Image (tube, rainbow, N blue to C red):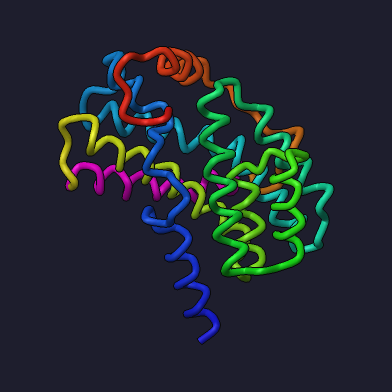
Amino acid sequence: MDDLAKILRLVQFADSALPVGAFSFSNGLESAIQQGIVHDAETLKAMVLSATKQAATLDGIALLVAHQAARMSDLCTIIAADEASYQRRLGEEMRLMTVRMGRKLGELGEHVAKTPLLADWMARVRSGTTPGTFPVGLAIVTSDLGIEASQAFAMHQYGVAAMMLGAALRLMRISFLETQAILLEVNGTVEDLYEQVRGGTLSDMRNFSPVTDILAAVHVKAHVRMFMN
């Protein structure tokens, strides 16, 4: 029964309807569509695959490091992972996305997990002494709920893809059937990505994605915007 409860916790916190504000962001997709880089199912799939690879080598490592630290109640390492995740983002909108979602997840976690570690982290987020990024918040909450690090990593990867595909349905001419086919294919890459980063340290985090950074910069000054990034 404990295994079944963990499965349901995974489903609950991986749900795209989780009230952390993911629906407000497109992870750069809106600009990509406006600039003609994404214009059909194939180009959408290519961008989502690129985004999930980038997420694995950046936030994925921060999440895994913070998850291990949370199990040992090591707040110093958690804060280091938080700073590393935030500082490696160049665009202001990308930073806004991660801290806004991170804070909302932390507030949600305070109501369901209610652990001293989460309370300490959120106190520092509110005081401005740590940014409060989404992957680190997810690491703390999932650790508190008994969800394994690999499963938390998979949840994060799924969230990146689901966010972008949900935005695509509102931004371009594409069907639910096509986005679900893309999601299934993207989900199939998660094990390989996990194996690539599972032993990574904070110094291994990398975020080289110049096209995404340019699109994010373009989006800041866009006259017509549906999403916050």
Front one among 104 and 98: 104
Q: Position of residue 71 (x, y in %)?
A: 75, 63
Q: Is residue 62 above or below residue 151?
A: above
Q: Position of residue 3 (x, y in %)?
A: 52, 79
| Magenta: main secondary structure | helix
Front one among 218 and 153: 218
Q: Which residue of the protein is positioned furthest toward the front in this rendering?
A: 127
Taking the spot 52% from the left edge, 46% from the top edge, the residue there is 192
Q: Is residue 207 above or below residue 1?
A: above
Q: Quadrant of residue 95?
A: top right
Q: Position of residue 153 (x, y in %)?
A: 56, 52
Taking the image as shown, residue 23 lies to the left or right of residue 195, namely left
Q: Is residue 184 magenta?
A: yes
Taking the spot 68% from the left edge, 33% from the top edge, the residue there is 205
Give the total number of marks visible in the rendering. 0
Taking the spot 71% from the left edge, 68% from the top edge, the residue there is 115
The answer to whether residue 201 is seen in the rendering is no
Q: Is residue 43 above or below residue 6?
A: above
The answer to whether residue 73 is seen in the rendering is yes
Q: Quadrant of residue 31?
A: top left
Taking the spot 64% from the left edge, 28% from the top edge, the residue there is 206
Q: Position of residue 69 (x, y in %)?
A: 77, 55
Picture quarter with the C terminus? top left
Q: Is residue 137 above or below residue 9?
A: above
Q: Which residue of the protein is positioned furthest toward the bottom in this rendering?
A: 1
Q: Quadrant of residue 85?
A: top right
Taking the image as shown, residue 199 lies to the left or right of residue 177, namely right
Q: Is residue 121 magenta?
A: no
Residue segment shown in magenta: 177-196
